[in-house]
Image (tube, rainbow, N blue to C red):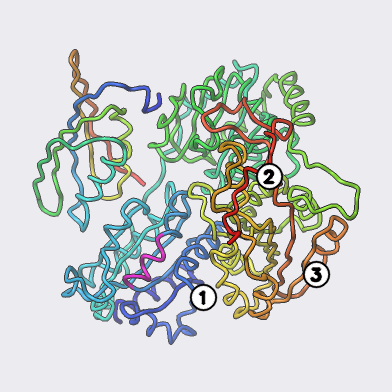
Amino acid sequence: MNAAQHILDAFKRHQIDTVFGYPGGCIMPLYDALVAHDQVGVEHVLCRHEQACALAADGYARASGKLGVCIATSGPGATNLITGVANAHRDSVPMLVITGQVPSPLIGTDAFQETDILGMTLGIVKHSYLIEDAESLPGIMEEAMQLAQSGRPGPVWIDIPKDILLTDIADRQAPEAPAMDAESADAGTLQQILDMLRQARQPLLYSGGGISLAGAENAFRRFASASALPNVVTLKGIGNPGRDNPDQLGMLGLHGSRAANLAVDACDLLLVVGARLDDRATGVLDGFAPNARLIHIDTDAAELGKLKPADLAVRGDIAPILDALADALDDQPLAIDDWRRRCSDWRKTHGFQAATNDDPHAPISGPGFIRQLSALTPRETIVACDVGQHQMWVAQHFQFDHPRSHLSSGGLGTMGFGLPAAIGAQFACPDRPVINVTGDGSFMMNAQELATIRRHNLPIKLVILDNQCLGMVRQQQELFYGNRESQINLDDNPDFLALARAFDIPTLAIERSDQIRRGIQTILAYDGPMLLHVAIDRSENVWPIVKPGASNREMLDESQRPNRTPSTRNKENAA
Amino acid sequence: MTPSTRAHSTTHSIRCRMQAEPAALERLCQVTRIRGFRIEQMQVHSDDGYLAIDMALSGSRAIDMLQAQIAKLHSVESVSTQSYTASATSTTEGIRRSA
């Protein structure tokens, strides 16, 4: 068995049945081994760009909780993966990246398609390896797969010279990777958390993507129910409480609900679980939760105290900690009824709201469309967003029942994420509805993946909210740059309907409010992929929004929109 | 404590033991740079598959944050720090790496 065959053998042993890749010169021995894939049991998904391979592996991992795997050749193949791997790194997505490298004797000679990919990617991986001898590969494969998925997950990259892929490896049992168990909190620490919760009059629960990464969804809901804490979530924590939690206030931060940000501002204890106090969530730190003691629970010790000192920092496995706290609170609930009522009132008056328009001929509003999409789709629907205004409208107005149903590029904010992520999610969850909600800007970043959808006849529904511009940039230019528009005009986009049809994907277009329901029902009912083009108003903004450099309590809403004069618009595409 | 609230620079020393694998030193230097420290001196000794590294650093950010980030590196076996200010010296003993 050569090293390439060993890699496939390792996939089989670890039940990795789907990988996303693109072949080329130096990775060819692995693709040659794949020819016998029926015996190997690995489905290789040929994306049409390596960036999409990494983003599809990311979507696969986010939707399933399993390891995402992507493969590419050396040089441009490897560098094209970088954005997708960085995306996974910033959002702590477990991923195994395998690239071919030029043959060992040629490394360092500027050989054809040689790049120092190990050096180039040090900052965007949890760990990386350059294989220097074939015999080390079995142990490194085991270690890499475990490392990617343990503790705080992340991408692990293995770069393998072509000659090593072809080298025979002695047939022996693969070594076991060393155990990497996370620590758990001791009884004294748990009692400290309980004491602080009982002393607080206005405690608030703040959760992030670490809940699903730790597989702690059930423990979180048990704790949320037992504590009855009002709760807020980060972008990646959306879905943590489930649709039916009565105490949720929605997302906090830059585009969070005013209710959530008011609660953070007023609370006297903030219990942060599986979140890293990202600047998009906190705003200016000096103004964040100014009256609160802070408890921070995370599996990554380096996140504790990184941005804001915690009164109690707890490193450990999230699920057993939350389970133990729930057990204690079941016997003796917290006395916070007044605070819960206050938060409930905030939710009613300052929760996310979408303007309604009874005129059937009114233009389609982004938030209004997303609300109808949410109402008409089954609970188990997976939504893969791109990045921009539509992403925030989904975060604000779509009701998610589970965090793994909401795939969104958080830390890196990668335009072009949504379509390949939807492909990955559909492979991970073939029986669930998958929708890619995208904007006209983001869609163009990986539109070539329509070919992947068509090849596999994936029943993904593509929804383009088209405002013919880079809406989020336009919004910020309007609000914070004196409405001076700079390079955001996309009104010369191609005909997306014709483009989709060129890939043999049927289409539907809507532009009026009375067409929304029928449009959504039509694509949901269609047995196969379909694209819905939704024309929306170019001037629509995401509200509320926190001004750059301000604290979250200083949110702007539409009533504070500056006077917009057409004369300030430039004519960038007029010629 | 935010990084910007620490105005003055302090001198630190870091002692680190890590596996001698490809790009090990680059990985360590990159983390040090990205987390806001300047390497003033560096000594490396190779020992039976491991690298013993002593670094003198300057920077205004919290050294314990850097220590935690270095300890996170998979190939780091141990890391300890010592800080020098005009009035005092503080030492943090080595911590084991874990996933």
Name the chief secondary structure element in magenta: helix
Asked whether A75 falls inside the magenta stretch, the response is yes
Could you tell me residue A101's position as x and y percent? 28, 72
Residue A256 point in image, percent of width and height: 64, 36
Mark nearer the N terminus (2 vs 1) = 1
Closer to the camera, A15 or A485?
A: A485
Q: Looking at this rendering, what residue extends furthest in the top direction?
A: B87
Q: Which mark is residue A45?
A: 1
Mark 3 and mark 2 on one chain: yes
Q: Nearer the viewer, mark 2 or mark 1?
A: 2
Labels 2 and 1 in the same subunit: yes
Considering the image in quadrants, where does the N terminus of chain A appear?
bottom left
**Which tag is nearer the camera, tag 3 or tag 2?**
2
Spatial CA distance of label 3 from label 1 is: 26 Å
Answer left or right for A509 relative to A449.
Answer: right
Q: Which mark is residue A566?
A: 2
Query: Which region is colored magenta?
Result: A74-82
- Picture disc at residue A241: none
Q: Is residue A315 above or below residue A88?
A: above
Amino acid carrying label 2: it is Pro
Q: Does the stretch in magenta take in A419? A: no
Please provide percent x and percent y for residue A467: 68, 56
User: Which residue lies under the disc numbered 3?
Assistant: A525
Task: Give the answer, above or below, for where A527 lies relative to A177.
Answer: below
Chain to which mark 2 belongs: A
